[in-house]
Image (tube, rainbow, N blue to C red):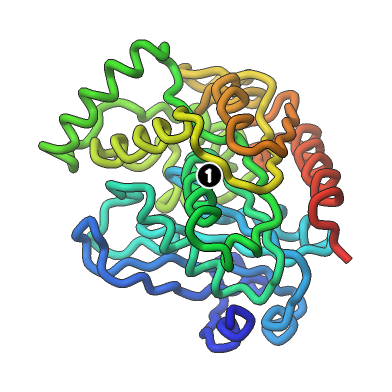
Amino acid sequence: MWAMTINNRAWTDDILGPDFQSTPLELGVDPDGEGDVRATLVRYCPGGEESAAHDDRPAIVWVHGMTDYFFHTHVAEYFYELGYAFYAVDLRKCGRSRQEGQAWHYISDLRYYDADLNAALDALPNPSVVILGHSTAGTIVALWLDRLRRTDSARFARIAGVILNSPWLAMMGISDTAYEAAKHVVYAGARIAPRFAIPGGDLTAYGESVHASHHGDWDYDLTLKPLGGHEKYLGWLAAVFRGFDAIHSGHVNIGVPLLTMTSHRSELGKEYSESSNTADTVVDTRQSQRWAKELSPHYSLHVVRNGRHDLFLSRPEPLDDAFSASAEWLRTVVPAE
């Protein structure tokens, strides 16, 4: 049944240009009360729509993090040339999927994203799929796959593996003891005022390091991905913390091979400087490495020296390293024919 769904979809030219197409994934009424919600599926199809619609190669599916959307044309081109189909998902209220009046990225329970990811998976013609999740998607994807493994064997059977690109799996900048105290305050506050905007969190070091208008090489839409990030709300933070709690419980198992990649160091809470270009300025890489290894018994770690938070937006040498490590791992897990 899943092989038929893609042929019934209306694909249109995407904002990334003629080699990319996108289609909305209508998800119905928002459980958080902001009208109807949708996700968006993007595909790279330089051979045209007809070839993409019947593509039976293994597929890579990119899932973005907070304050993000898919614009990484070079990533799609690289994996396509390796022999993989390439797709990306803009989640509800993010990037292409956000609709007028909706709070950017707001969600009160990460399990709501299961509908987005299930819809994307169902729309693919490819029998074998690798999820490539960045930052917050590390938590989102891990929880989704753990639920699929336990409750949806048909969908789960199509997942060949996962690559996590600098996953956000724990609260950075505070001790475990401080986190335990803080989360109860966040949970209580979220029950009373879930739409309370969290102060702070507006450092632009990462955005300045990657965007072409400042010190980077990447020209993306600053409305969809502002330099300092979208506003964040207490209800959203509580949802993320509950996701962290689940992962830290030791009971989450994605059930497939996992490659985690991080930079070799973090540089948090500072304004932009040249060193921002050679570190993760968003999450604590030690926490990513600590918790990612708990997600799968088939775990690999690759540390990218001088990588940025999104390793695929790094400078040329670490970018090549991230690509090469991904390609080597893919050849062992789901080789392209």
Within 10 angstroms of label 1, few (less than 14), some, or many (20 or more) residues?
A: many
What's the residue type where badge 1 is placed? Ala
Quarter holding the N terminus? bottom right
Q: Residue 201, how many percent across, how many down?
A: 35, 28
The residue lying at 41 percent from left, 63 percent from top is: 115
**Element at label 1:** helix
Q: Please say if 80 is above or below 5.
A: above
Q: Which residue is mark 1?
A: 142
Query: How many marks do you count on the picture?
Result: 1
* Occupied quadrant, residue 4: bottom right
Q: Residue at x 58, y 55 (%)?
A: 71
Residue at 59% of width from left, 60% of height from top?
156
Residue 98 picture location, percent across and down: 36, 61
Query: Which is nearer the eye, 38 or 310?
Result: 38
Toward which corner of the image does residue 84 lie, by quadrant? bottom right
Task: Depth check: give the residue in front, 243 or 155.
Answer: 155
Residue 45 in percent (x, y) is at 70, 74
Query: Residue extending furthest left?
Result: 192
Residue 182: which quarter of the image? Answer: top left
In front of the other: 93 or 272: 93
Residue 304 vs residue 90: left or right? Answer: right
Point out the image quarter for the C terminus.
bottom right
- Vertical placement of 121 versus 238: above or below? below
Identify which residue is drawn at 38% across, 74% down: 26
Percent position (x, y) of residue 106?
A: 30, 49
90 vs 271, nearest the viewer:
90
**Looking at the image, residue 126 lies above or below residue 86:** below
Q: Is residue 317 above or below residue 161?
A: above
